[in-house]
Every structure is written in structure tokens, then in C-alpha cells.
Image (spheres, rainbow, N blue to C red):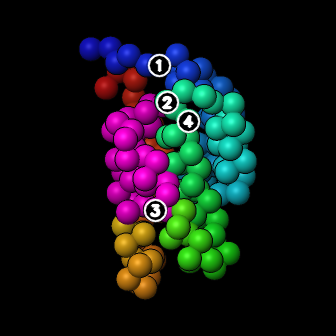
Amino acid sequence: MTQYLDPEETSLMRDPRFGEAVRLFNAGEWYACHDGFEELWHETQGPCRRTLQGILQIAVAHHHLDRGNQRGAMVLLGEGLGRLQGAGAVQFNLALDPLRQAARDRLLALHENRSLESLPIPTLATVRADS
């Protein structure tokens, strides 16, 4: 069964900047990842824009965490989750449910003043196109 991809989504997935931004996200290079996703986000006008912004905000939240700004991290995690709320389980061949779950778990821990050490850092896992 073939999944229909929006032409804008297909274009973004083929853009080398997108692959690099995903790589940087998964490497925990939050600021550099932010730059890559933000550039693409500014160029995007369709339904993919909201998902890109959600991923971008989760990355920036982790940049804030690295700099000790828990309040900024909480705000951006919440906003990122809100932006990703309407997205499906998979977009850009990325599994969004594990990303949302990791971000939710970390946001809850921050609200409860718990340590994040035992919680996984969000990643952007690729889903095989033939799955």
C-alpha cells in the first residue's frame, strides 16, 4: 500500500538541508539543527509548515535546557507539542509519536521539578518507506 505524500513534503524530504537538520537533531546539536529547520520553515507555506515548527520548537527547548533555562524549555516543549498535535504518526518518513512521547515525558518532569537524566532525549526516527 502506497502512502500519498504531499508534493511539498516530498520536496522537503529530498532537500539535503532537511536530512542534515534531522542528523543534527539526533546528534543533540540543537542550535545548528534549529538553524536548518528554521530556514526550511521560512520557505514552507503548506501543511508541512506546522510540523516543521513543532520539531524546531522541541529542538530549541533542548537548547534552552543545555543553557539552564528550564522555563524557556517548558514553554517551547509545550508549544512544539501543540504544533505536532494535528500531525499523523508519520510525516517526512519520520516517526512522530515517539518524538511527541519523549517531549511530553520531559515536559511533565520539568513541571514536576524532576530530573531528566532517566528520560530519553527526543530523536527523529526514520520510518522505512515500504513499511
Mark drawn on residue 78? 3
Vertical relation: 120 (above or below) 39: below
Marks 4 and 3 in Cβ contact (< 8 Å)? no
Which residue is tagged 1? Answer: 6
The answer to whether residue 64 is visible is: yes
Q: Residue 70: give x, y in percent of width and height.
A: 56, 77
Residue type at mark 1: give it.
Answer: Asp
Residue type at mark 2: give it.
Answer: Pro
Which residue is tagged 4? Answer: 49
Quick one: label 3, few (<14), some, or many (20+) residues within 10 Å? many
Residue type at mark 3: give it.
Answer: Gly
Which residue is tagged 2? Answer: 47
Q: Is residue 8 left or right of residue 63?
A: left
Q: For the image shown, how many numbered marks are present on the structure?
A: 4
Give the mark nearer the N terminus: 1 vs 3. Answer: 1
Marks 2 and 1 in Cβ contact (< 8 Å)? yes
Distance CA(mark 2)–CA(mark 1): 9 Å
Viewer-side residue, 37 vs 115 = 37
Give the mark nearer the N terminus: 4 vs 3. Answer: 4
Q: Is residue 20 left or right of residue 89?
A: right
Marks 2 and 3 in Cβ contact (< 8 Å)? no
Where disc 4 sits, the SS reads: helix
Quick one: label 2, few (<14), some, or many (20+) residues within 10 Å? few
Give the residue displayed 34% in from the left and 18% down from the top: 3
* Extent of the magenta region: 77-104
Distance CA(mark 4)–CA(mark 1): 12 Å
